[in-house]
């Protein structure tokens, strides 16, 4: 097993439902990844342009998930076509520096 190609147990098909409509959240950057026990919190932001002389990022959402799910997402990104692999490589390098 490697960070690039982790091994996962076979997936069982589970039906997914969305009983309420959740809003999409647009973000332009991953600010940080925080370790919370066995979970990780991903903090995302967008730039604030009201004062161009003072660059600022505004946090718009946080996503908390088990660390193994984060690894699974990275693996899926690496398998995706075209430029998604590049983004996944960057994400993997970033996450490996998290304390």
Image: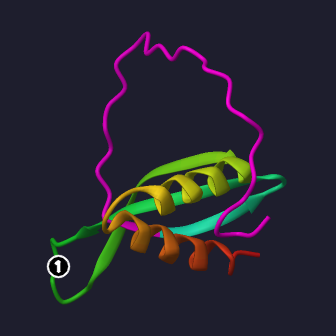
Asked whether 50 or 95 is in front, the reply is 95
The quadrant in which the C terminus is found is: bottom right
Q: From the viewer's perspective, is 63 left or right of 86?
A: right
Residue 27 belongs to the span the image colors magenta: yes
Residue 62, image x, y percentages: 52, 50
Question: Left or right: 47 with respect to 60?
Answer: left
x, y percentage for residue 44?
44, 60
Secondary element at image label 1: loop
Q: Is residue 14 left or right of residue 25?
A: right
User: Considering depth in this image, is 95 or 83 the residue closer to the camera?
Assistant: 83
Instruction: In the rendered view, tell whether residue 48 sits above or below residue 42.
Output: below
Residue visible at 60% across and 17% down?
14
Front-lying residue, 15 or 65: 15
- Please give the name of the residue rendered at 31% of the width and 37% of the height, measured from the top-left corner: 24
- The magenta stretch spans which residues? 1-30
Give residue 36's quadrant in the image. Answer: bottom right
Give coordinates of residue 17: x percent, y percent.
47, 13
State whether residue 78 is above or below residue 52: above
Residue located beneath label 1 in the image: 51
Q: Is residue 42 above or below residue 97?
A: above
Q: In the drawing, does residue 65 fall left or right of residue 83?
A: right
Locate the N terminus and report the quarter of the image it occupies: bottom right
In this figure, what is the number of numbered marks? 1
- Classified by dominant secondary structure, the portion drawn in magenta counts as loop
Neighbourhood count class around disc 1 (C-alpha, 10 Å): few under 14, some 14–19, many 20 upward: few
Q: Quadrant of residue 75?
A: bottom right
Q: Residue 72's x, y, as percent?
A: 63, 51
**Which residue does the image show at 35% across and 59% down from the upper left?**
81
């Amino acid at each position: 097993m490697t960070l690039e190609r982790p091994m996962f147990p076979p997936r069982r098909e589970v039906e997914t439902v969305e009983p309420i409509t959740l809003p999409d959240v647009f973000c332009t950057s991953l600010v940080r990844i925080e370790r919370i026990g066995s979970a990780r919190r991903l903090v995302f932001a967008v730039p604030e342009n009201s004062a161009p002389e003072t660059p600022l990022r505004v946090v718009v959402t946080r996503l908390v998930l088990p660390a193994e799910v984060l690894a699974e997402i990275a693996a899926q990104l690496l398998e995706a076509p075209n430029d998604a692999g590049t983004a996944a490589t960057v994400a993997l390098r970033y996450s490996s520096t998290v304390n």
